[in-house]
Amino acid sequence: MANIILGLMGGLGLFLFGMKLMSDSLEKAAGAKMRSILEMFTKTPFRGLLVGTVFTAIIQSSSAATVMVVSFVNSGLMSLYQAAGVIMGANIGTTVTSQLISFNLSELSPVIVMVGVIMVMFCKNNAIRRTGEVLLGFGILFMGLMNMSSSMSVLKESPQVVGVLSSLTNRFAAILLGLAVTAVLQSSSATVGIVLLLASQGLLDIRICLFIILGCNIGACVSALMASLGAKKEAKRAALIHFLFNVIGSVLIFIVLSIGLEPIVSGLAMISNGNPAREVANAHTIIKIVEVIVLFPFNKQIVKLTYLIVREDVQTEKESGKLQYIGAKSVFSPTTAVFDATREMERMGHIAIENLQRAMNALLTLNEEDIKKVYEVEHEIDYLNHAITSYLVKINQTTLPADDAKSLGGLFHVVNDIERIGDHAENIADAAKSRLERGVDFSEDARKELSVMLDLVIKVTTYALDMFSHNNQEHMQEILDLEDMVDDMERDLQESHIQRLTRNECTPSAGMMFSDIVSGLERVSDHATNIAFSLLDEDPIEQQKEQRAAGMSL
């Protein structure tokens, strides 16, 4: 008996590891692309349903898909109504795993593992290696199934084991068993796979398997519910949509099974050619499809119900914390981690731009409240800089989608560039404070020049932030042209302020202050340009320099 238990444990371990390796490898290979698809094609609940089905079928994990959706809602990328469709689709997509398991591919698993190992160890191409990891996980999964199946074939010869399993006739106990096992394994596919094996060995009757599957449906909600703990209200509601859908659907299917169990069992046997494994897999798929058909028309009502359960606080969440997309109030998912960091950096960038405008207004109007506010906001920018950098270090230690992993280096530079823009705003506030204390005056021409230059710098910084955060290259050439204009203007203003000094139209103190501010604004423009092109493979600025040099040589 000890050998049988060890065999079952080893087989289950291989099965779970293979499933995780396959899911993680697929997510790593396709995560960034699938995220883009989710962004583009989930504008309506029905399209979200289709995308959720395909996406989950590809990554082989409804838990991962649901956690990703919760993260999208947390980031504001997806509305709850869009999320409802994706979550319902994920419930259908997850049944693909049990369908694959029901086709006994165990005999081919050693070959699949060997092919995967060769691809991982001897191929240098990253795409081929990632495909090898997927095949390796797939093969290990079926090797685990083979081990469990051989152990279970011995178990069916034990009268005690057969007696215990055959005594499981209570439908509610079966639901609780499915719920508990799925909650522990964090995978409804794994639980259905085990049930499928037990049924194929004749250890579980298909009638009780149907109710265990209903328990699996509810247990599958645990991952998303745990991920949403401590998250923002919208993320909690997204996880609650998954929970309500599965619970309500399971209750409806329970009623149907209670009324017409025997005809349903006969129908399953007919469409599955009497194969118990196929019966379980087909039952799993049919239950999910029926739930979606019945509940999809009521997705708006389900979303509204989540608002009744999770109510808004009097104080909005924006006001209650400095971090909005990462940190304690966020939902961590490797597939959306870089996206969440980018959203937080975009927010940090807009705060820095507003503070730069505030600082210049303080310089020209000598408004003490503005000066004080600049310093307060600069502390917030410093906090965001440290928090985002720490987050980037953290996600660098996880398994990220390949495209996201490539962009990490650029993100570290971007957060530093934004922080430097904040520092220049503080420098201007220092100048405003000095003007106020020492009575330094600027000429009308100097004021106008600073205002014009600031407008150019704000424009290029805004375009740069949009290009970085949304990959919007519409203003790429304009950014390059504005950068040249700011450089030229900096030289012209430095010259004009020297001429004013020679004509005694301004004091040396005002002249030095003016010169420092103009230089600072030019450096802000440099930082903005760095931000714009931080994630591009080729540097357009260097290309432009090379083209100019080539033109001059001709």
Image: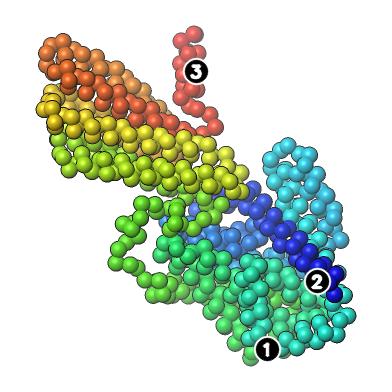
From this viewpoint, is residue 404 visible?
A: yes
Name the image colouring.
rainbow
**Place of residue 411 in the rendered image (x, y in percent of width and height, measured from the top left):** 48, 39
Quadrant of the rendered structure where residue 65 is? bottom right
Kind of residue at disc 2: Ile
Q: Which mark is residue 5?
A: 2
Q: Nearer the viewer, mark 1 or mark 3?
A: 1
Answer with mark 1 or mark 3, whichever residue precedes in sequence: 1
Q: Quadrant of the N terminus?
A: bottom right
Q: Residues within 10 Å of mark 3 (few under 14, many from 20)?
A: few
For label 1, the crowd category at 10 Å Cα-Cα, with few meaning under 14, some 14 to 19 and many 20 or more, is: few
Q: Which residue is identified by label 3?
A: 546
Q: Quadrant of residue 98?
A: bottom right
Q: Earlier in the sequence, mark 3 or mark 2?
A: 2
Which residue appears at 66% of the width and 67% of the height? 185
Q: Residue 104: x and y, percent?
A: 82, 66
Q: Which residue is mark 1?
A: 170
Describe residue 469's horizontal placement relative to residue 537 as left or right. Answer: left
